[in-house]
Structure formats: structure tokens, C-alpha cells
Amino acid sequence: MEPIANVNGRRMPLAEVRISPLDRGFLFGDSVYEVIRVYAGQPFLFDEHLRRLGHSLESIRIHGIDLEQLRKRVLDTIAAGPFREATVYIQVTRGAAPRAHGFPNDATPFEFLYVREFEDPYVEARKQGVVVITTPDVRWDRCDIKSTNLLANVLAMQAAKEAGATEALFFLPDGTITEGTHTSFFGVLGGKLLTAPQSPAILPGITRSLILRIAAEQEIPVREQTLRLQDLPRVSELFLTGTTSEVLPIEKVDQCVIWEGAPGEVTRRLQRGYERVSERDAASGGV
Ligand code: PDD
């Protein structure tokens, strides 16, 4: 099935979408985005993604986007497929205007989304674990905004690919690990589940929040506290979370082997918890 797009309310094949060369998303990265997973035709954690989009839009002062209208467009585009296992990509730019850094006076935001079938590339990796590398976090101070300025992430991910790894973890000058290029990061240390606290240094991952909720339900002790590179030799488990990755165990970071054989107990419990919630939500028509 070909991906289907919706541009400012008009549905069309993705291949037919045309974007102005003066669009500020293209010229300046002046835009924000979301990626949503669709299970059994239902967008998963839809409200949470729309809320985060609202936060990103507000943070970069793009006003007047009707999120309820956007919600209807997403549902309408999924139904036009019909898509079952899919992803939705949403991007809102400040619009097209003669090139100048400051905001234009009269640009109309460009509201773009598309739905495409998702063939899960991580089925085996979720059982067997992945190898990741570490790389300095050279991003800016507002990583809580889901902006399309992703050059640092792109270069770090390419370094991972060239090293034969699945993801790159960013670390700050003091060794604090923030997150992956497109995933949140968790570890188990001394029996506690640790992840970086919400701050402008990380994206408030939607999957991260769900995992914290599942951990609380399962009475797994949690501390929102960062792990540092120095902690890695002592951790018993590490994993990544993200909209398409779900819960992805890490078996090796750079030269540091985390486990040999099988992912840890906490990781597997959280994977099962994630499966239960996503299956339940899909069966109940989405929440
Ligand atoms: N990335 N951290 C970063 C920097 C991300 O880009 C993402 C998501 C995450 C995980 O967030 P969530 O659980 O809400 O997907 C963490 C998306 C999937 C992407 O850029 O494709």
C-alpha cells in the first residue's frame, strides 16, 4: 500500500505532495514533528503525542494549529488506507516566506502528515538485544522540543551504522548519558530502574512515560536519575525505548558487554507489559 498524506487538510498520495523551496522547515529547520505508532488500525498513545506536539508548537511560537482538527485528519488518513500496522508522521512548519531569519509577518503554517505501513525491523533485536555506541552530545539546550533540527542525531546515527551498531547514545562532558539519537535510555543498577529525569536535555519520550507507568504498576523500583558512562560496568541491564523501537534490550555499549545470553528480567517484564498495553489499547479502539 502506498503511503497516504494529508497537506493542510487535503488528502493525497505521499508521492504527490509538493513543498515550497521557501518553506522555513526546509530552509531553517523551523518546524516540529511527531511519530506515532498504529497498532491494528489504532494510533497508540495518540493523546500523549498530540499533547507533546502542542508543547513543541508553543515552545517555538507557532500559533493557531487546531490539534483536534489534526486528530481527525490523522484518523481519516489511517481509515483511507486502510492501514493496520503503520506509523503516522506529522510535521508542522512555520510556512513559506522570503528567506529571513526572523519570523515572517504573514506565513501560514504548513500542516503535513502521512501514514505508511510499518514492517517492524526490531522483532529479532527485541529478543536478542542490540549493540550501541556512545558519542558526545553536541545538541542544543532545548532537546525537549521535538524539532526537525536533527543534524547532530543524523551524524551520530550514521556513526553508529558505520560501527555496525543499532543506535548511538549521547553523553555530556561529565559522562552523563542523556538519550539515544531517536530513543530514550534506561538502565538497571542495584536493582533499581534508572532513566534520565525529564529536563530540557532530553525529549520527554512518550514510550519512556509509558514504561515508567508500567514499572510502577509492576512495583519495579524506579529512580529518575541519569546514568553516567562510568556506571556502565556496574549495570545489570540496559534498554532503549521509542515509538518504533518499543523496548529494545542493549547487549553491548562500545566495548562494554552488558549481558551474554538473554535480556535481563526487568527488561523482559517491561517488554511484556508494553505488549499487553498496546494489544489492549488496539482491541479497545485506542485510548
Ligand atoms: N524519535 N529521544 C529522541 C531524541 C527521539 O527522537 C525519540 C523519538 C525518542 C523516543 O520518544 P518516543 O517514545 O516518544 O518515540 C527519544 C522518533 C521516533 C523519530 O525521530 O523517528
Image (spheres, rainbow, N blue to C red):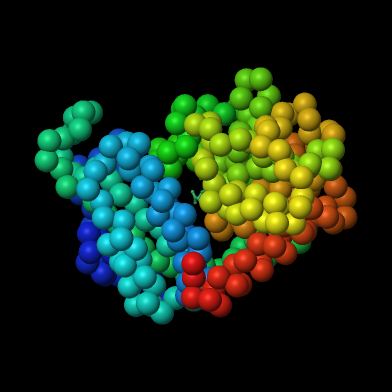
Image check: 52 left or right of 207? left
In depth, the one of 146 and 3 nearer the eye is 146
Residue 211 horizontal/vertical position (percent):
65, 53
| Residue that lies at the very extreme toward the top in this rendered image | 174
Q: Quadrant of residue 16?
A: bottom left
Q: Quadrant of residue 76?
A: bottom left
Q: Quadrant of residue 98?
A: top left
Q: Is residue 151 above or below residue 246?
A: above
Q: Residue placed at 56% from the left, 41% from the top?
A: 181
Residue 33 horizontal/vertical position (percent):
39, 49
Q: Is residue 67 visible?
A: yes
Q: The N terminus lies in which quarter of the figure?
A: bottom left
Q: Is residue 171 above or below residue 70?
A: above
Q: Residue placed at 30% from the left, 66% from the top?
A: 73
Q: Is residue 221 above or below residue 76?
A: above
Image check: 140 left or right of 208? left
Q: Residue placed at 77% from the left, 50% from the top?
A: 220
In depth, the one of 70 and 30 nearer the eye is 70
Q: Is residue 162 visible?
A: no
Residue 141 horizontal/vertical position (percent):
47, 27
